[in-house]
Image (cartoon, helix red, strand yellow):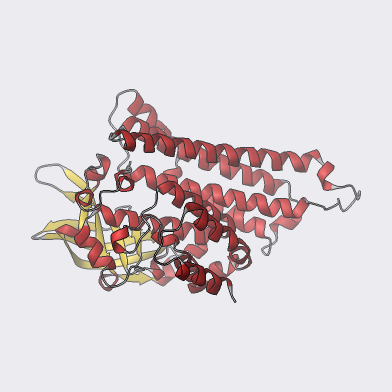
Amino acid sequence: MTVIEATAESARTARDQIPTEADLLARASAMLPELRRTMREHDALGRVSDEAIALLREAGFFRILQPKAFGGYELPPRTFLRVLHEVARGAPSVGWVLMVVGVHNWEVALLGERVARDIWGQNPDVRVSSSYVPFGQSRQVEGGYELSGRWKFSSGCDHCNWAFLGGWVDLPGSEREYRVFLVPRTDYAIDDASWNTFGLQGTGSKDLLLDKVFVPEYRTHAMANALDCSNVGLKDFTSSIYKYPFGTLFSFGVVSAIIGIARGARDVYLEGVKGKRASFTGAELATDGFLVQALAEAESDIESCLAQLDRMVDEIEADLAAGIVTPVERRAQYMAYCAEMGGRSIDAVLRLFRRSGARAIALNSDLQQFVRDILAGGNHITMDTVHMGANAGAVTLGAPNRVAIL
């Protein structure tokens, strides 16, 4: 029985039950060897393989944040973040796509039951990709909006039937509004030649092309509503998980994936030195302080980042339990903290790489794969320490927030 078949059998057995966090983490841990073994296949394809997507689907990972009314588990974001961490630990590109696509099943709920029925009315396994940066043009028309142009970096788009696209819309006067639009696969083309990178190549984060596509009003939401947690979907989906701040949850997802990649690099490094001896001296590598110090430092950085992430989640859950919206000032700080945590994770991996010798630069080395992928992930907009830090400091001092997705 293959890993996919075993995972599918386990998921079918519990089809009518909501799995526990422990169940989901056990499934993620069980697939780590398979994820690592096939890690480089995704780069060769320029997208995550069909087999890996099937593995995630059968394990139920895409359903963790999905509403129960449409076949999901509706579990706390903490569970999703922990599962995501494990998957990224095994295969960075697979973890990245799970992060992006899995969070979208949470975002769909923000738009309400009508939109959820459009997506999952016939099939609860339908998936949504995204491109939030307003690369294309969007304008208001009668009954909705019209979109044209090229939207970049739509991770996992080959495996999705819909896409969330971001855009600025001019309002009467000199004002404008940032909105997110939900577009079906039939309304956009995927540019297969647009994704060619040195890291996270397996995510298949390709460009989406649109030409005068109409999006009805009900399939869009203003980021201002996400900022104050007043999305229309909260009338239909009342679970507290859908009251999380939008940008905060996305940042938590990005940094959880990056910390997971760092953990995977640590695993590879440990395998390379444990029980081994130096080529010249024959001494046990475990006695080489130069090598083991990097391992200890990486472990410390990874664990402290995970602990900080847990603390931030604790604080948001306390806010939800008290019936309050997490203040913008604290959310700006969370975004800055996530960017700093991403930087610490990258630094930990680079230290491991620098102490791994010439073998680590070989293209068949797993460690160099993790290095390239974590560097690529670290260039995500949410990991920009300068702008996120400056915004957090300014908001703390009373200036207005300047991050559109917070």
Query: Which residue is depicted at the point 59% across and 62% down?
Result: 30
Quadrant hosting residue 297: top right
Query: Which residue appears farthest toward the right when viewing the image?
Result: 281
Asked if residue 376 lies left or right of residue 36, the reply is left
> Is 50 above or below relative to 164?
below
Do we see residue 308 in this rendering? yes
> Is 179 above or below relative to 330?
below
The x and y percentages for residue 83 are: 50, 54
The x and y percentages for residue 89 are: 58, 54
> Is 137 above or below relative to 37?
above
Query: Which residue is depicted at the point 68% across and 54% down?
Result: 268
Query: Which residue is depicted at the point 56% across and 57% down?
Result: 26
Query: Which residue appears farthest toward the bottom when viewing the image?
Result: 1
Looking at the rendered structure, the number of numbered marks drawn on it comes to: 0
Asked if residue 40 lies left or right of residue 249, the reply is right
Asked if residue 198 lies left or right of residue 127, the reply is right
Do we see residue 391 in this rendering? no
Query: Which residue appears farthest toward the top when viewing the image?
Result: 397
The x and y percentages for residue 106 are: 33, 54
Quadrant occupied by the N terminus: bottom right
The x and y percentages for residue 49 are: 50, 71
Quadrant occupied by the C terminus: top left
Quadrant hosting residue 152: bottom left
Query: Which residue is depicted at the point 44% across and 63% down?
Result: 60
